[in-house]
Image (cartoon, rainbow, N blue to C red):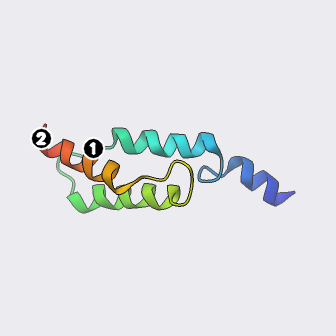
Amino acid sequence: MWKELDGRTNAAISSVGRMSHFQKLSTLRPSPGQPLNLYFAELHDITTELAGSEEAVHNVVLKNHIYSLVRN
């Protein structure tokens, strides 16, 4: 019973939770005045949560996300 409940509520397991993580990655930006390592740590956490799932973040997507910040 606990495993099923965890499977339904764990954000990394449910498809809705994974999409929420992917959306967060898409909108994530460094916070002004905060060290960049906090931003990259959060990117790492999100990509780790999504690794091995259908919503896994490919390197090209991650690089494009980071490079788009430099261009803007």
Q: In the rendering, at what x and y percent does residue 55 appear?
A: 51, 48
Q: Position of residue 40 (x, y in %)?
A: 29, 59
**Residue at (36%, 40%) from the top-left corner?**
26
Circle 2 packing at 10 Å, graded few (<14), some (14-19), many (20+), is few
> Which sits in the foreground, 33 or 41?
41
Q: Nearer the viewer, residue 62 or 72?
A: 62
Residue lying furthest right: 1
Question: Quick one: quadrant of the C terminus?
Answer: top left
| Viewport quadrant of the N terminus | bottom right
Residue pictured at 69% horizontal, 48% vertical:
9
The residue shown at (24%, 46%) is 31
The spot of residue 65 in percent (x, y) is 28, 45
Residue under pointer 2: 71
Amino acid carrying mark 2 in the image: Arg
Residue receiving disc 1? 29
Q: Sequence-wise, which precedes: disc 2 or disc 1?
A: 1
Q: CA distance from mark 2 to mark 1?
A: 13 Å
Drawn side of residue 70 relative to residue 2, left or right: left
Mark 2 against mark 1, which lies toward the viewer?
A: 2
Q: Amino acid at mark 1?
A: Arg
**Residue at horizontal 73 percent and vertical 53 percent from the top:** 7
- In the picture provided, is 45 more to the left or to the right than 60? right
Q: Secondary structure at mark 2?
A: helix
